[in-house]
Image: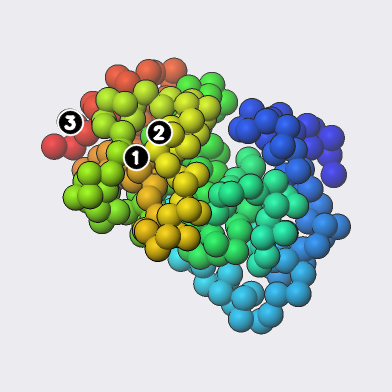
Amino acid sequence: MKYSKMAALVLLTVSLGGCGNLLGIKLLAPERFGMDGVAEGVYIETGADAQAVADLRAAMLRAEAAIRAAYGNVVSRPVVHACRTEGCYEAFGGMGSRAKVYGDRILLSPRGFNWHFLAHEWSHAELRTRLNFSAWWRLPTWFDEGLAVSVSEAPEHSEAHWQFLVAQDIPRPGRDELMGFASSRLWMDAVRRYGVTQNAQRRATGAPEVRPVYAAAGHEVRPWLSRVGSAGLLALIEGLNRGQVFDALYPVMARVTE
């Protein structure tokens, strides 16, 4: 294992979420930490049955199709690690989330073991692969997440969920506030502020879970992506790589296709 590859993952995990995410470094050697390889670049927690392996393969095929539909083709090949127990997920740095991505390494929890969350994290990896470092660093987190929500079609983040939030008058960010969530820190602060951390209590009382910030991002980006298509998304990425400003490109891409 090359030092440069390990160093890059260390820097990325720290930038994405602090020293706790350093547990993700173990994904560089998954077979040493309780995972079995079932295909090239695909690992599942040791002890998984044949059905779980088949389900993972099917999820990968559908997730890849979703990435291709949004981006036009697929240039990233993230390594996928699927946990079947919460203990496995926590051992690799997963805390509370359903899935996460460390650079080109995707980690799925038992709650995120489906094509929706695989496609969500794959979208992050695909976008990161297509952007140079400067462009990726300047990309607003709300757009990155909104694009992943749009690609993945997860019911938890869907337009139907957004309309439920509106109908029930559940607190949610407006468009201007959403666009202020430019960094990962601001995004996660908003996720907590709008009640995702209270979903365990909501489940205990029989109330439906809410994910207002992710739903808001999908509500914003989903119609944009529908208008601009793969060509518009790729044009946005190209512009960012040339050093253009996101806030100048984003509305222009939509107008060009109207």
Task: Locate residue 221: give its quadrant.
Answer: top left
In the image, residue 225 above or below residue 50: above
**Hey, what amino acid is under mark 3?**
Arg
Residue 3 position, x and y percent, is: 84, 35
Q: Nearer the viewer, residue 140 or 60?
A: 140
**Hey, what amino acid is under mark 2?**
Trp
User: Of callouts 2 and 1, which one flags the residue occurring earlier in the amino acid sequence?
Assistant: 2
Q: Name the residue carrying label 1.
A: 217
User: Of callouts 1 and 3, which one flags the residue occurring earlier in the amino acid sequence?
Assistant: 1
Label 2: how many Cα within 10 Å (few below 14, some 14–19, many 20+): many
Alpha carbons under labels 2 and 1: distance apart: 6 Å
Q: Secondary structure at mark 3?
A: helix
Looking at the image, residue 79 sits to the left or right of residue 234; the answer is: right
Looking at the image, residue 147 sits to the left or right of residue 189; the answer is: left
Q: Secondary structure at mark 2?
A: helix
**Hey, what amino acid is under mark 1?**
Ala
Mark in the foreground, 2 or 3: 2
Alpha carbons under labels 1 and 3: distance apart: 20 Å
**Residue at the far left in the pictured view:** 258
Residue 28 position, x and y percent, is: 77, 48
Label 1: how many Cα within 10 Å (few below 14, some 14–19, many 20+): many
Q: Are marks 2 and 1 in contact (CB under 8 Å)?
A: yes
Q: Quadrant of the C terminus?
A: top left
User: Of callouts 2 and 3, which one flags the residue occurring earlier in the amino acid sequence?
Assistant: 2
Q: Name the residue carrying label 2.
A: 142
Q: Secondary structure at mark 1?
A: helix
Q: Name the residue carrying label 3.
A: 255
